[in-house]
Amino acid sequence: MWYLRVKTINKKSTMDLSSFILLLGTIAIIAGLLGSLVGIGGGIIIVPVLTIFFHINIRLAIGASIVSVIATSSGAAIAYIKDNLTNLKAGMFLELGTTLGAFSGAYLTTLINVNVLYILFSIILLYSAFIMLKHNHKKDNEIVLKTSKDKIANALNLHGQYYDSNLNKTIKYKLTHTKVGLGLMYLAGLVSALLGVGSGMLKVPAMDIAMRMPIKASAATSDFMIGVTAAASAGAYFARGQINPILAWPIALGVLIGALIGSRLLNKFKPHLVQLVFIFILIAAAIEMINKVA
Amino acid sequence: MSKKKNTNSINQLMSSETFIAYVLQFGVISASIIIILGAWELFKNNHLVSSNYQSILGRSFVFPHSLNQIYLSVMHHQAVGIISLGILVLIITPALRVLSSIIMFIFKKNWPMTYITLFVFCVLMGSFILGLYN
């Protein structure tokens, strides 16, 4: 693995705590920045980096990552709510699924062998790379549902609208397949609790493809939901002593700062290039995670 | 006359989605301030900060993981306690957000969504409590 040659030197070297914190913070800022440019939370990069380069216990890595996920989600949600992109009712409804999933996952994680976590992580990383590849080729004009036969969506009026600043018009949309969406959200919550990620990679396609929510609204709503999902498992991690505060704080603040900067730069970067870099990182991380299986 | 105006604007605030945004802002900023205070306390301790970074990752490194432990640690001005408190505030922020959503739906008199959000809140509380008693 040629790209690791530089880093393996650090494997045996020691460093003092303040340098470690500084390094963590820098990595976290970059992770948050890149992540917000492609629409992922930092978690999916943070855990592999901590376990692969620093050889930190994966459960501690997950604990730290989950805190950073809450930080970014809450930070991003503020902007999205004010922009009226977030579909609050649909989001809260779908949180029925994510919180139950996270609840199950937080309990399950104590029963699961660490090696299984590594394998699961690899799968999720590869899946995320695949989803991003698909998105790279996605056409810009999406067809929005004007009518819906979905009983739940109609009964609760989960349909929404938002003002698209790119297209300069208000887009009204209707949702469908709410039960499928709910099931997928349960899965997303489960994965989030097990791996310490935001599961945006599962939530956004679930809303976008299954429920036919426009991509911008899906991304905003997903960001909004991620925080609650992560909180549902964070409480358990915290009580089990799996959130090391000294480890978690530079990561949480770093990813938050990176995401805040990234969301301002969103328009200035060519998304395709960033996505390609990210896909490479995801695949490399997936390979390394498999290597960690004993 | 002004009293009526006040309740009207409170009504408007509570039933608008920006109320939730403000709650989130409050949570994130409060948590960040507490964490930064804790970090400042951490860097004051030169002995810990110049030691090998592995010292905080080992099994012997003690940090609080219950409300009582956090309280005691903060009272003793310990960096780990203050930072843990900040992290706890961060973890609670989404729960506060769900709570404010419940309030918003009540003000909008949207009872189905009120019940749904209430259920989500209960699952959240359940996972917090279960975590504490595991």
Image (spheres, helix red, strand yellow):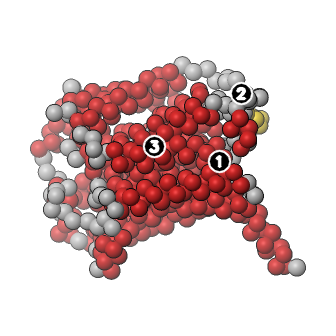
A13 with respect to A3 (left or right): left
In the rendered structure, which disc, 3 or 1, sits on the residue that comes first in sequence?
1
User: Circle 3 — which element?
Assistant: helix
Front in this rendered view, residue A141 or B118: B118
Residue farthest right in this picture: B1
Q: CA distance from mark 3 to mark 1?
A: 20 Å
Residue A9 in percent (x, y) is at 14, 39
Q: Quadrant of the C terminus of chain A?
A: top left
Find residue B118 and report its image quarter.
Answer: bottom right
Would residue A159 appear left or right of A112 to someone viewing this image? right
Amino acid on which the number 1 mark rests in the picture = Leu
Q: Is residue A201 above or below residue B75?
A: above
Amino acid type, residue under disc 3 in the picture? Gly
Marks 2/3: CA distance?
A: 29 Å
- Label 2 neighbour load within 10 Å: few <14, some 14-19, many 20+: some
Q: Position of residue A78 (x, y in %)?
A: 59, 53
- In x, y percent, where is residue A270? 53, 30
Position of residue A74 in the picture relative to residue B46 (left or right): right
The residue that disc 3 covers is: A101
Q: Residue at x 83, y 73 (%)?
A: B5
Most extreme residue toward the left is A12
Chain ID of residue with mark 3: A
Element type where label 2 sits in the image: loop
Residue in the image at 70% along x and 32% along y: A150
Query: Quick one: quadrant of the N terminus of chain A?
Result: top left
Query: Relative to residue A63, is residue A172 depicted above or below?
Result: above
Mark 2 highlights which residue?
A: A144
Q: Pick whichever, A103 or A193, lies toward us.
A: A103
Judge whether residue A249 can be spotted in this image: no
How far apart, in angstroms, are the residues tagged by discs 1 and 2? 18 Å
